[in-house]
Amino acid sequence: MWPFVVAILFFGLLISIHELGHFTFAKLFKVKVNEFALGMGPAIFKKKKGDTTYALRLLPIGGYVSMEGEDEESQDENAFNRKKVWQKFIIVAAGAIMNLILGVLIVATILSMDGLIGTNKILRFNENAISQQTGLKEGDELSQTVETTNAAELLFFTDKCQVYKAKASDFEDTKASALGDFIPSKLEFEKDEKPIYMAVTSDYKGYMLFVFENGKVAKVTMSGYATKTNRKKLIKAYSDKSPIVAVMYIEEDAELVLSSTAGRHLLVNTGAISPKAAKDTAGVNVMTLKKYHKVQDVRLYKEGEFTKPHRYRTKTLPAAGATLSADDTAEQLSLM
């Protein structure tokens, strides 16, 4: 019942906004409006002000604006039929324009209200939710999706500079709607240890990249994580000399965008960074930072992301990068 009532009221709102558009511009162009009514059927309220009767009618399923000279010729100087063509066009189109504006406002409101649209973050749990009992907490979110095979090996890097290894086949096949396994429990993480990145490989080729707040980047050969004894846990999986900003697995060299808290952006090809076999290497200086500033974001560069990418590239490392140009600032805002 309630959905039907809400639908009727919403339809009434659409019609009312539509008719308000006609009415507003009719008044603006001094067209004589005989009646402005919200709703249809018998009038439950009427009031005349000037030449216009304002009415509220019983059924919230429509409305209308009755203008002098709208349906027949009128000699009144303020009649609709005596107005200029462009004025009549605006009055007629105003209803649809108002509906368009309403639609934009509704979408903007929905997007600004957390929880009313799809998200990969857990906002809250229903009472006695099974998912909460598995160890999930409010604020947890889906961070990675990967398509692979059961033969692939999974490397879970944690916030304690460790990596836990498993095979995709260690996890049972489930429905897409199933929660699956809770990784810290499945792989026996230490207390309060959290996964920060999952690397998927079948041949241990390529590199692991570790980007730190101090502007250093470590490029470690993936083969360094391969073990012959099927060890499930490796300590000192990456350096702890500076807080980690990002962990990435790349099969071949790629371009990265590093962003600092100073608003600078640096475009770096990982080919310029020498790979190391030592997993806990502190890395090399890549981004020069001023005092009190740090690297805050790292992402793979997408072709066309910057209008003039050469502005952010450098021939030598380390480099400070550059602030966004006016064109790139607009581009970044549009991506958001």
Image: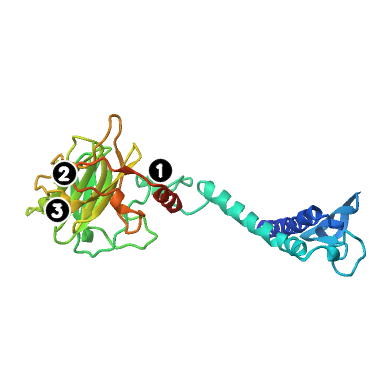
Mark 2 secondary-structure assignment: loop
Q: Residues within 10 Å of mark 2 (few under 14, many from 20)?
A: many
In the image, taking residue 268 as reference, residue 3 lies left or right, namely: right
| Residue at 14% over, 49% down | 220
Which image quadrant for residue 293?
top left
Secondary structure beneath label 3: helix
Q: Position of residue 298 (x, y in %)?
A: 29, 46
Amino acid at dot 2: Ala
Left/right of residue 274 with respect to residue 336 in the rendered view? left
The answer to whether any part of residue 232 appears in the image is no
Question: Callout 1: helix, strand or loop?
Answer: loop
Q: What residue sits right under mark 3 in the picture?
A: 222
The residue that mark 1 highlights is 139
Q: Quadrant of the N terminus?
A: bottom right
Q: Rounded to the nearest whole Å, what is the CA distance between mark 3 and mark 2?
A: 11 Å
Residues packed near mark 1 inside 10 Å, few (<14), some (14 to 19) or many (20 plus): few
Q: Residue furthest right?
A: 75
In depth, the one of 57 and 265 nearer the eye is 265
The percent position of residue 216, horizontal first and vertical second, equals 20, 40
- First of labels 3, 2 by sequence position: 3
Mark 3 residue type: Met
Query: Hey, what amino acid is under mark 1?
Result: Gly
Farthest residue to the left: give it: 228
Distance from the alpha carbon under mark 2 to that under mark 1: 26 Å
Decide: marks 3, 1 in contact (CB < 8 A)? no
